[in-house]
Amino acid sequence: MERLKIIILNGSPKGETSVSVQYMRYLELRFPQHNYEFINAAQNCTKYEKNRAAFETVMDKIDNSDLVLWAFPLYYMLVCSQYKRFIELVFEREKTGTFKGKYTAALSTSIHFFDHTAINYIQAVCDDLGMNFLEGITAKMDDLRNEDFRTGFDKLFSGWAQSVRTGRPVSRGFAPVTNETFSFVPENTNSIVQQPGPQKVCIVGDLEHKDSNVRKMAALAAGIKPGAETIDLGSLKFGPCAGCLKCGFDNICAYEGKDNLINLHRNTILKADIIIFTGAIHDRYLSSVWQRYLERTFNYTHQPRLVGKQIGFIISGPLAQNHNIREILQGYAETMGGNLLGFVTDEPADNSLVSRSIEHLMHQAHDWNKAGVRKPKSFLGIGGMKIFRDDIYSHLRFVFQADHEFYKQQGLYDFPQKRFIMAMAISAGMLLTKIPPLRKKIRQQLRQGMINPYKKLFSKILPAGVK
């Protein structure tokens, strides 16, 4: 059997002490006929950014490989910011040719919270690099201890090796992005939203250079909302999340007192009524600076801390061609408890349209906050919180003790089995369906029974404005 040269790009900031790495070590033990080399792409990202020779050495190793495996833990619906920065360096330094034609696969470890968006991101990046993406595995952190998983994992890896040997054809999963160059020139909308009372507005994002579209869009939004505080993440000095989990016991981050991001997030951003997040698209997501901010807010771990706040997004770049980004940002807003206002982008390349869209967003934020508008959550918010609820109640409770206390206090342990009266009624109804005549009659009335409660409701409803 042909001996393959396999490069494993480790996406954990913890280096070798990573669960994701253990999955790769398993492959190394099970299939010792191949050559494996581990590259700590996330942990050593700063080194690769400052030392061009070290970065080029990594590129040479990838160039001489037969199979590239991306292995990473999830950090807020994506990869960690250090891994994201490593990927940005590949594009910025025009090293895409190093990856072109290489066979590749990816494995993420998590609690299955938005693991699909992280795998989508890596696959889209691999497509843009011209790689042959074979598979994306979304494993739970302890799946490797399950024999059935290991059996399936063995078969998948054997399939990857066979694909490399036979030159299996692979289709793209994500279409190429067409990104038109457009320099946004804000138009004066002559519109100012008055802010009666204590309403607070915060505009947060990586605003990049002085002539960037995202900076000009953020400035226009701030001008429409007098008193809005703008926070440029790119101008702040703050370190990346190290994945140490020290915050799990009491929500105290290892960076406490070492940089000003924690206090800025705690005392400014979280106290705003309206938060407008801004950013520009880099490869298939926003910038690594934006991701670093998001993961650093994990000092509140899995607690929804944006409850009741109006959340909007102003994005520079081809958002409509990157639905995965939209899904991540919507999922973030919903699982954190915020009320999603919507998205504005400069993608239309029309100064008037973009300016008026920002104007509308800011007016809508003001009006919805004043009226207390709260939209129902989608599957993204509801499903995400159910995963948090179940896992924190069970095996994550020891590490995330602060979450456990928060969930108890906020009534987030809303397990169905606590609805005893409904459970008894359903059980009694199920027993009735065992009686053939009643079963037949109930079947005939199912559709009508679903709308009967609404007839009772409508009989009590008056026209709007009538009391």
Image: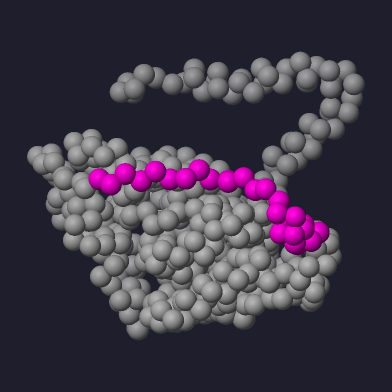
Q: Position of residue 380 (x, y in %)?
A: 53, 47
Judging from the image, the colouring scheme is one colour
Which of the two residues, 376 or 360, is positioned nearer the viewer here?
A: 360
**Image side of residue 157 versus residue 272, left or right:** right
Which of the two residues, 152 or 398, is positioned nearer the viewer here?
A: 152
Q: Residue at x 58, y 46 (%)?
A: 172
Q: Residue at x 67, y 48 (%)?
A: 169
Q: Position of residue 154 (x, y in %)?
A: 80, 63
Where the N terminus falls, by quadrant? bottom right
**Image side of residue 382 versus residue 191, left or right:** right
Location of residue 17 (image quadrant)? bottom right
Which of the two residues, 452 or 11, is positioned nearer the viewer here?
A: 11
Q: Residue at x 34, y 68 (%)?
A: 266
Height in image: 154 above or below 314? below
Could one spot residue 248 in this view of the protein? Answer: no
Which of the two residues, 371 or 253, is positioned nearer the viewer here?
A: 253
**Image side of residue 19 versus residue 437, left or right:** left
Q: Position of residue 186 (x, y in %)?
A: 16, 45
Q: Is residue 175 magenta?
A: yes
Where the C terminus falls, by quadrant? top left
Q: Is residue 430 magenta?
A: no
Segment colored magenta: 155-182
Q: Position of residue 363 (x, y in %)?
A: 23, 40
**Count of picture labels:** 0
Height in image: 126 above or below 141? above
Location of residue 94 (image quadrant)? bottom left
Could one spot residue 210 in this view of the protein? Answer: yes
